[in-house]
Image (spheres, rainbow, N blue to C red):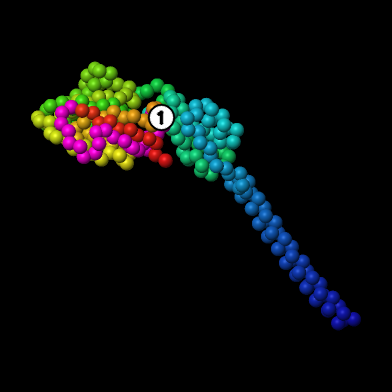
Amino acid sequence: MEIYTIMNIKNWFINAYTISLVAAAGIVLLLILGVKSWLNDYTLHGQEFDLPSYRGLKVEEAQADLKSKGLVGVVFDSIYTSAVDPGCIIETSPVSGCKVKPGRTIYFHVRPRNPRMVSLPDYNSVQLRQYINSLEGKGLKLKDIKFVTYEHKDLVLGVELDGKPVVKNQKIKEGSAVVLKVGRGKEMEDVEMPVLVGMNFEQAKYKIFDVQRTYTVTYEGGKHDPSVADRDYIVYAQSPEAHVKLNGEFRINISVKKRK
């Protein structure tokens, strides 16, 4: 009788210990599953998606689409560009294609509806390349160059807008295209035509300015696409031809096409 009782007690302890282990393991498993479920809900696991492109859309249109996806769209800053219409989005941050989750804020970089007025940079004793950089930094464009006889070569002598002189610090619309008057030196030298075919349009312009000539550009298809940067157009024809030596006043003609 005594031995039976001891065995029963021993079995009871073993069973109780086993049950406790099983219960503890069950509790730990439930805790793990609970934490995982909470993390999934907290981090919105599995709900991320690729951010679509809103380039060229009005801010209001993009905000409505983002709201339907559980996102928020906010205008961050404005940048002048001719690539999109006024009041439209240039790019977003994060950029399109990035993985985003509901609740995230998307920042818009937009073209202002009304162009800002900016001051024309001072051109007194400024070299051509330096002044072009100053113009671009102000959001202005170079339309053309008029080279004139002057003792100092490549010195900017004046700026014109719509055929009228513009003085330093005068306010003009951002995005305006100006004409520069630039000195070419006292004597016109023979010019050897540079090799322009194969260059991008941006490189070709600087090569043409280096030989102190202006240019006429023809776009493939007859139309310029403002959404394509100059560096993404490639020169495929030029006139006069490369290495020909010429003198006097003449323009260089180039034909460009979009980079493939």
Residue depicted at 25% across the width and 40% down the height: 195
**Where does the image place residue 208, in percent across and percent down from the top left?**
24, 34
Residue depicted at 70% across the width and 56% down the height: 30
Find the magenta span and give its range.
224-249
Figure quadrant of the N terminus: bottom right
Q: Name the residue under label 1.
A: 221
Foreground pick, 86 / 116? 86
Q: Is residue 73 left or right of residue 45?
A: left
Figure quadrant of the C terminus: top left
Tag 1, which secondary structure? helix
Q: Residue furthest right?
A: 1
The answer to whether 195 is drawn above or below residue 58 in the figure is below
- Disc 1 packing (10 Å; few <14; some 14–19; many ≥20): few
Q: In this view, does 206 lie to the left or right of 59?
A: left
Foreground pick, 218 / 7? 218
Residue depicted at 32% across the width and 24% down the height: 176
Foreground pick, 69 / 236? 236
Instruction: Look at label 1 and name its amino acid.
Output: Gly
Q: Does the magenta stretch include residue 81?
A: no
**Where does the image place residue 147, in percent across and percent down from the top left?**
18, 27
